[in-house]
Image: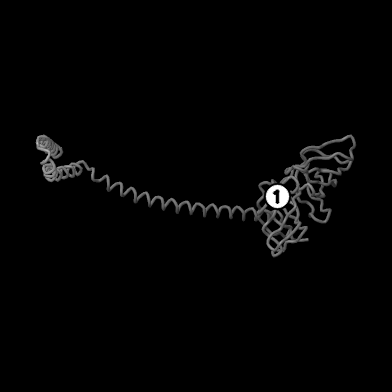
Amino acid sequence: MYTKKKYGIVGIIVTIIILIILFALTNVQNSKMSYVENLANKIVMPIQNGLTYIKNKVNGNNSFFTDVSNLKSENKELREKNLKLEEKLRELESIKAENESLEQYLNLTEKYSDYTTVPADVINRDLSNYSKTIVINVGAKNGIKENMTVIAAEGLVGYVISVTDSTAKVQTIIDSSSSTSALLSTSRDSIVCKGVLNDDTQLKAMYIPTDATVSQGDTIETSGLGGIYQKGIYIGTISSVENTTDLTNRYALVSVAVDFSKLETVLVITNE
């Protein structure tokens, strides 16, 4: 406290000296002005700079620049650490996705343990109005052939229609040109489920026997007829029954079990 007061008095004295010099300068002839100004600067500036330094030292202002330098260094270190953390997070997310995919494969394999299967990922899908196909990342080198059944955890997906060395194209059961021989869960009557144009979630159950009892909520599974699909693979449930004046023309709508817009993991049944 005493030191601050002391330097404050010194500052006042220096200010008075500066004012006296400036007053004297205003009364000097213009020809001598430059010389006197230089002399004043040489005398006054060192004193003023010294006092400023001492004042900053006393008040701690000199630490500001050091703090700024330290903050810049710390900020750089934090940015580098943040980049490393982001990289580790991406790696963990990738590992998590791989684990989830492996878990799906394991669940599928256990569920369909009666079949010999090859796991695959969906790498492309075409769910347009007229074509509803997917492409998977296994092919001839993995033992995949045309007409092999493709399934998912939820149920039937479709069958292989073409193969390359490393990929296979699958026509899904929701394709409008697809027909699937099926069975009603209650009556065990045979029906045919066809894809519906402009619909990715339903099939049209046709050729229902006139004496068959069809109810909303009945489950549908493959019949094993037709030479493509094995028997007993789940397809979906009946969402509505459309009666007509002629019983031979009645039909039902079947909500498929598989969400084809989100389908990622499948199994190809290789045993014939």
Q: Residue furthest front?
A: 31
Please tell me which residue is depicted at 86% across the width and 44% down the height of the picture. Answer: 207
Instruction: Give me the residue at 76% from left, 51% from top.
Output: 233
Q: Is residue 6 above or below residue 114?
A: above
Residue at disc 1, secondary structure: strand
Does any portion of residue 104 appear in the rendered image?
A: yes
Quarter of the image for residue 29 reads top left
In this rendering, position of residue 222 left or right of residue 100 = right
- Give x and y (percent) for residue 265: 66, 53
x 13%, y 46%: residue: 42
Question: Looking at this view, is 246 or 130 the one in front?
Answer: 130
In terms of image quadrants, where is residue 30? top left
Q: Amino acid at mark 1?
A: Asp
Point out residue 141 in the picture as x, y percentages from the top left corner: 69, 65
Is residue 5 something one can see in this rendering? no
Q: Quadrant where the N terminus lies?
A: top left
Q: Nearer the viewer, residue 82 or 180?
A: 82
Q: Could you say which is closer to the camera, residue 206 or residue 41?
A: 41
Which quarter of the rendering shows the C terminus? bottom right
Residue 40: percent from left, percent from top: 12, 42
Give the side of residue 2 with respect to residue 251, left or right: left
Relative side of 20 to 99, left or right: left
| Number of numbered discs on residues | 1
Q: Position of residue 161 (x, y in %)?
A: 76, 56
18 lies above or below 84: above
Please tell me which residue is depicted at 39% across the width and 50% down the height of the picture.
Answer: 78
Rendered position, 1 above or below 70? above
How packed mark 1 is, by other alpha carbons closer than 10 Å (few <14, some 14-19, many 20 or more), is few
Query: Colour mode?
Result: one colour
Residue holding disc 1: 126
